[in-house]
């Protein structure tokens, strides 16, 4: 039952909730910028809420917390707010939404929440990939980038507050990007495929993902608080959104399109006016290395007396000039993402980098005395064979050889850290139709890599646990029937194996099935701006490539 904090008077009180640990949420730029923007409105008060859970959370099988969740600022419980706004960047956090609601004595499902309970909304990357698995728990999703969308939503909320508080959400439907799942019915064939998706008028049949057309009209900037100790001396500034590269597996690449850059002038004048106290400026963006003025901007930032850091860099963009900037910027470790060991697999995923470019980038970095490399690889990619896995080892050996060839000049040896992640097929990408590789296949590849790489000096391997890959695939490609599985996992205190056994849902149907190209997919109703036919063309090309291997 709702009992609103008196201190907020007539303001709309929003609990902005990051359904994971504070240290993770505090380091999330999207979450923190929303918090800042909401509090800039005079008619809104926004406070932050996190799930205080042990490392890795309920998703990893830890028992959920028991205490009543409260906001950071006024220590208010969730029921004191008008709106609960979940920011959800990862599917892994779905289960934490249920924990937060139930600990707050708020019914889990929309249909059981009357006017006495806050409005529950959600946004963030996973929700505009595929919101369906959590749709029964959320009153309204905001599909797309948050800035204008959230402003428009709040304006509509304030204009129609009494109606919306009675849980009639019709006035919100005027806002492009607002998705009210309870206004849709989904029917299934006896085989479990979607046969029909019916919208109750005036709900639109398609929801258009919202993007900020002109990101240059505002600056996204953030400094980290104490909790995010890893970044405590860094200020982050976003340089661009979207990525022009189109790697076939990459959800971020497809979902953040179109590619948009901020002007260097605006970024620099912001930094000069505000003079952040932190020592390092981190440049952030989906396609940072494709920022057209990356080199001049970096040089200017260095000339202001800052160190510089990049969220990620494409291997083919690491020139001698950029390596020199990285060195001057104080970077001791650089992260590179070859993604696959063999050329044929890199071509298949459209990574568009050659082995020569990888080794040239390593060489340029080592010559600048940047000796520590973090390398990202995926296993279980479509069409992958053990030969491609062996190619990872051979590439690492060539990289080590390049590093060692400089040992007389550098006098030191750095560390090569490999992060190996099993590939999970993501909605709204060309690879959405491919199945997840079986857990047996993933384990076999991982075991071989761990064993062989452990014999390579100075090479360290970090790998995700395969069983969580399976859970992620189920949540990623699931439809609204998955909500009942989530409820069961919640009741079983995070015990996924037991819940899989008890549930009538067959999780393999979502994880291991090759999806038919003509079937209706659970997320097809979201217009991401990239047509299904474009994704399909890429998928069919990839299949042809696999057939010709
Ligand atoms: S993997 Fe990197 S380069 Fe490729 S589309 Fe995604 S963000 Fe862009």
Image (spheres, rainbow, N blue to C red):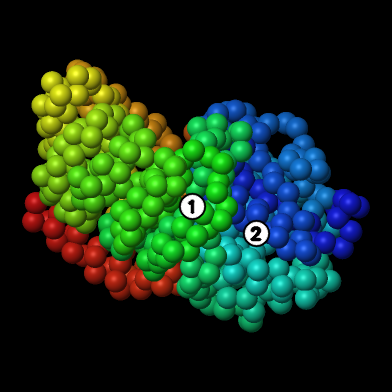
Residue sitting farthest toward the right:
6
- Residue 242, percent from left and from top: 39, 62
- Residue 311, percent from left and from top: 40, 46
Residue 357 lies left or right of residue 167; in this view the side is left
Element at label 1: strand
In the image shown, does 289 or 1 lie closer to the viewer? 289
Residue 343 lies left or right of residue 48; in this view the side is left
| Vertical order, 370 against 174 (above or below) | above
Residue at left 48%, top 68%? 216
- Decide: few, some or many residues near mark 2? Use Cα within 10 Å; few <14, some 14-19, many ≥20: some
Q: Which residue is mark 2?
A: 37
In the image shown, does 314 or 306 lie closer to the viewer? 306
Measured in 3D between alpha carbons, the distance from the residue under mark 2 to the one under mark 1, in whole angstroms, is 15 Å
Residue at left 82%, top 61%? 11
Residue sitting farthest toward the left:
548
Q: Which residue is mark 1?
A: 237
Query: Of label 2 and label 1, which has the lower sequence position?
Result: 2
- Residue 138, percent from left and from top: 65, 58
- Residue 397 shows in the view: no
In the rendered structure, are the residues bearing label 2 and label 1 in contact, judged by CB atoms less than 8 Å apart? no
In the image shown, does 442 or 157 lie closer to the viewer? 157
| Vertical order, 238 against 279 (above or below) | below
In the image shown, does 459 or 292 lie closer to the viewer? 292
Residue at left 48%, top 72%? 214
- Residue 140 shows in the view: yes
Image quadrant assignment for residue 13:
bottom right
Q: Is mark 1 within 8 Å of ligand 1?
A: no
Element at label 2: helix
Residue 370 lies left or right of residue 55; in this view the side is left
- How many marks overall? 2
Residue at left 44%, top 42%? 305
Q: Is mark 2 within 8 Å of ligand 1?
A: no
């Amino acid at each position: 039952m709702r009992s609103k904090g008196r201190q907020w008077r007539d303001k709309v009180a929003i609990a902005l909730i990051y359904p994971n640990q504070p240290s993770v949420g505090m380091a999330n730029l999207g979450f923190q910028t929303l918090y800042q923007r909401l509090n800039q409105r005079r008619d809104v008060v926004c406070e932050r809420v996190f799930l205080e859970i042990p490392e890795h959370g309920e998703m990893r099988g830890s028992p959920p917390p028991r205490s009543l969740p409260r906001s950071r600022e006024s220590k208010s419980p969730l029921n004191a707010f008008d709106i609960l706004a979940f920011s959800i960047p990862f599917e892994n956090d779905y289960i934490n939404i249920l924990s937060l609601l139930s600990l707050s004595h708020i019914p889990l499902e929309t249909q059981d929440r009357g006017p006495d309970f806050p409005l529950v909304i959600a946004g963030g990357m996973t929700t505009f990939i595929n919101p369906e698995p959590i749709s029964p728990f959320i009153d309204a999703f905001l599909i797309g980038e948050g800035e204008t969308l959230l402003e428009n939503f709040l304006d509509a909320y304030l204009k129609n507050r009494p109606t919306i508080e009675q849980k009639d959400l019709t006035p919100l439907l005027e806002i492009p990007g607002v998705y009210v799942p309870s206004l849709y019915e989904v029917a299934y064939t006896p085989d479990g495929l979607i046969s029909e998706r019916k919208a109750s008028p005036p709900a639109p049949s398609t929801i258009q993902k919202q993007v900020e057309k002109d990101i240059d009209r505002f600056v996204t900037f953030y400094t980290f608080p104490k909790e995010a100790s890893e970044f405590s001396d860094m200020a982050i500034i976003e340089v661009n959104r979207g990525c022009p590269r189109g790697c076939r597996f990459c959800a971020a690449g497809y979902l953040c399109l179109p590619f948009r850059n901020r002007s260097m002038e605006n970024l620099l004048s912001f930094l000069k006016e505000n003079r952040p106290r932190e020592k390092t400026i981190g440049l952030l963006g989906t396609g940072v290395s494709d920022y057209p003025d990356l080199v001049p901007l970096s040089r200017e930032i260095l000339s202001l007396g800052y160190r510089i850091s990049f969220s990620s860099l494409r291997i083919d963009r690491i020139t001698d000039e950029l390596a020199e900037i990285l060195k001057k910027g104080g970077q001791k470790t650089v992260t590179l993402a070859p993604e696959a060991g063999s050329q044929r697999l890199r071509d298949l995923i459209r990574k568009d980098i050659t082995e020569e470019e990888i080794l040239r980038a390593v060489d340029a970095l080592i010559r600048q005395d940047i000796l520590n490399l973090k390398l990202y690889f995926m296993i279980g990619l479509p069409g992958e064979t053990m030969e491609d896995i062996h190619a990872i080892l051979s590439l690492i050996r060539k990289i080590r050889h390049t590093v060692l060839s400089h040992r007389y000049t550098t006098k030191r040896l750095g560390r090569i850290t490999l992060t190996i992640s099993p590939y999970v097929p993501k909605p709204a990408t060309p690879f959405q139709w491919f199945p997840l590789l079986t857990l047996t296949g993933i384990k076999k590849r991982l075991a071989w890599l761990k064993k062989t790489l452990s014999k390579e000096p100075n090479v360290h391997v970090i790998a995700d646990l395969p069983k969580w890959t399976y859970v992620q695939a189920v949540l990623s490609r699931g439809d609204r029937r998955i909500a009942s599985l989530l409820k069961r996992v919640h009741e079983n205190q995070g015990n996924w194996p037991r819940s899989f056994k008890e549930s009538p849902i067959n999780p393999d149907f979502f994880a291991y099935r090759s999806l038919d190209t003509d079937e209706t997919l659970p997320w097809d109703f979201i217009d991401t701006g990239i047509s299904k036919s474009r994704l399909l063309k890429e998928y069919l090309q990839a299949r042809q490539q696999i057939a010709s291997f």
